[in-house]
Image (cartoon, rainbow, N blue to C red):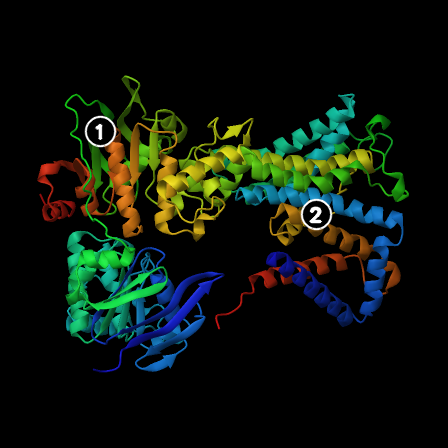
Amino acid sequence: MSHPIVEFREVSKSFGTFFANKNLSFAIDPGTIHGLIGENGAGKSTAMKGLFGVHSIDGGQIFIRGKAVVPQGPKHMMGLGVGMVHQHFMLAGSETALDNVIVGEEHVGLFQKIRRGKVLAELQALSAQSGIPFQAWNTRVQDLSVGDQQRLEILKLLYRGSDVFILDEPTAVLTPQEINDLFATLKRLKSAGKTVVLITHKLKEITEVTDAVTVLRRGEVVTTLRTSETNASALAKTMVGRAVSFTYSGPRTDVAPDAKVCVEVKNLRVDDPFDRVKSASFFVKSGEILGFAGVAGNGQSQTFKYLSNPSAFRGRSSGDYKTLEGAALKDQTHADPEQLRHSKIGIAPEDRHHEALVLDFNMNENFFLGQQSDARYQKYGMIQKSSVREAVVRAIHEFDIRPKAPEHPLKKMSGGNQQKLVMARTLDPAPEILYIAQPTRGVDVGSIERIHAEIMKLRNEGKAIILLSSELEELMDLCDRIAVFFDGTLMDTVHRPDFDLWTLGQRLGGSQ
Amino acid sequence: MKDILKSFLGVFIGLGVGLLVVVAVGENPLVVLKAMTGALVSSPYDIGMTLFYTTPLIFTGLAVAIPLRAGLFNIGAEGQLMVGAMAAAVLPQVVSSPFLAVFGAILISGIWGGLIGWLKARRGAHEVIVSILMNFIAVGITSTLANGMFKDPDSQLGETAPVAEVFHSVPFSFFAGAPTGVYTVFALFLPYLLYGVMKRSVWGYQLRAVGLNETAATLYGIERGRVWILAMMAAGAVAGFVGCMEVFGNAHKFRMGFSPEWGFSGIAVALLARGKFSAIVPSALLFGMISKGSLALELETEKMTREYAMVLQGIIILSVTLTHAYKKRAK
């Protein structure tokens, strides 16, 4: 066997007293697809940042092709043939695909003419040779599909001579079909002799596409295995440290035949240059979960945003929006967040970092967000710090949030724990109607189980829930009905007995 | 803690570079240093004057730092303090109690500041541009009034008639004639008071939330427009204290051009304090000391003038910014 192409030997990295990586040792063989799996905060990204020279490592050594290397930064590592596709693509949206490849090329002198034709020919040859299809070289990146953008990133790295491709959570933004395409791409890279490192917390991806997998837990390597010698549930157990179930297996009460309609939306239209809602009509009854499914940009997020704060859409939305308050439906067409809260609607927005939380605040301050007028938490305009803290301590207990310190800044917490705090806040005071978006995005397996159980508990208690998720499997697991969005239109609502991953995936792509 | 050390380091480097400038002009830096420091504390009067120079900088520093918390950059403190001063000079003709006069003056300067927030909230006008323009309007209005409607008929200058004695704030006798009184004491406490308000009150919370994450704040029921207006009103009110201090504590009337651009120095004070309320007093004190100390330069040296204060301030801000920007490179 030849040298491993990348090898970590006893690599450590600590932040203060916290070990993000502790004596990591593992090797990646050339020409393989190697999975790096672990819960959020397990140290996957820290390890890769160390490999990339984004930060220095405290101890140990990194070897590339058998030679000890002290990574100086991305440029240095690119020079050694190590390339990375980040979760958020490093592309300039307003420039063409071709120019995005040319930007950052160091061979072009300041006053030298850029030879677009030559680069284009080379890229086309590369695309044909590698079997990674890409045609839209002269299209602006912002007009490309996410899948195309990802392929562009990979081709860009190929063009720059990368041998090792590190992909950070590449499937988070893709439809099932696009994920298949991506896996095909990865396999082609492999057959061309390249090495792929796939960072993920999704077990299915590991078992489907990798040759070997390294499992991280709490900053340490638990084990490195051949994928053929393991399976998803065994991996999950190693990853979390206990047995985990992937699908919800708890009770699911039947929706009462006389269940009241709690949310009713008719003929919703929202004008927006990027994400338009042309037509959406739906309802949710008490004790059921309605899922919103759609590929990004097809109106489901915008509909969710409208439901969460109609007042922000004044003048560019039309249609009816009513929710149940007491015994009657109340018009919410122009309601603001404060009024929705008053109508006992709890909201967990889609973008945890930009919409749900203030990352520079601590847990107490974040818990208070949205509760500014709540008499339990403020008196005479002064924050009742001790009551807020008590509530946070309760939430920490109930949701098993870590660390167990209410004064801990949010930005130093893992995504799963941040999301648990968002959930705890959404349920205080107890709502009757819930709008929950992407509850498990970037959340580790152990916490997903817990969050799903919580959502189902609320459903069984008779709350009406709208669930927006980019994970079709999650929607299929939890929802009673799934509303399919395409091109700004709510095309159809599929009932639970008719759930099927493949057909749903196709409908999200617009086919009937 | 580390931040404080960095700031101190920056200040010392800045002073060092500032003294190199002195060498470059051909003066002896030791003489300059001695003249400047000597002028600060050599007598109770000097101490009083140093504090007198510091006080307005605390107010204007806060007038910049408060909106900064809400994500707004207030360049309008100069106009706000002028409006406050004019109001302070005129109100005694209407009200009889000094308390009401002060309250009225800061209310008016507060409204003047709040206008900037209102224009941003209602019309989307950028606060930097609006506040700069409002400075010109403030100069225009106050000089028109000082030369017209409220002009002191017994004076050749553009100034208002003196206010009655009951409105005067009496300086502390300890300072032997320096016009340093209750306003200074108030200014020394105000940043710490506001720090508590920011931390403990719902109002302060909303302000910080909007400053740190406008989207989340809006989605959770905080009206950013209201926050902007109130933040700018608070800024205007605090800047208005400079006007009150000038009219009730120092000149006893509105004089055209009384402010040596305190409003703009306030930006420097707030930036040096890195927007932190707890650092406003030391930051203002440093600038106050430089302003006071540089007055001695014209007497003690041949080539140096009081404008050296501006040079030194600029260098210090640069060096503090640089020490904070400096990060240890990955090993």
Residue type, label 2: Val
- Read off the residue under disc 1: A287
| Residue B142: quadrant of the picture | top right
Residue shown at 16% from the left, 61% from the top = A208
Residue shown at 27% from the left, 37% from the top = A455
- Seen in the picture, residue A468 relative to A120 is either above or below; the reply is above
Q: Chain of mark 1?
A: A
Q: Position of residue A60 (x, y in %)?
A: 40, 74
Q: Position of residue B243 (x, y in %)?
A: 73, 36
Total labels drawn? 2
In depth, the one of A488 and A161 nearer the eye is A161
In depth, the one of B191 and B90 nearer the eye is B191
Q: Chain of mark 2?
A: B
Classify 10 Å Cα crowding around label 1: few (below 14), some (14-19), many (20 and above). Answer: many
- Seen in the picture, residue B194 relative to A409 is either above or below; the reply is above
- Seen in the picture, residue A314 relative to B211 is either above or below; the reply is above
Disc 1/disc 2 C-alpha distance (Å): 58 Å
Pick out the residue farthest to the front: A242
Q: Is residue A492 left or right of residue B301?
A: left
Instruction: Report the disc number at residue B281.
Output: 2
Q: Is residue B244 left or right of residue A485?
A: right
Instruction: Report the disc number at residue A199.
Output: none
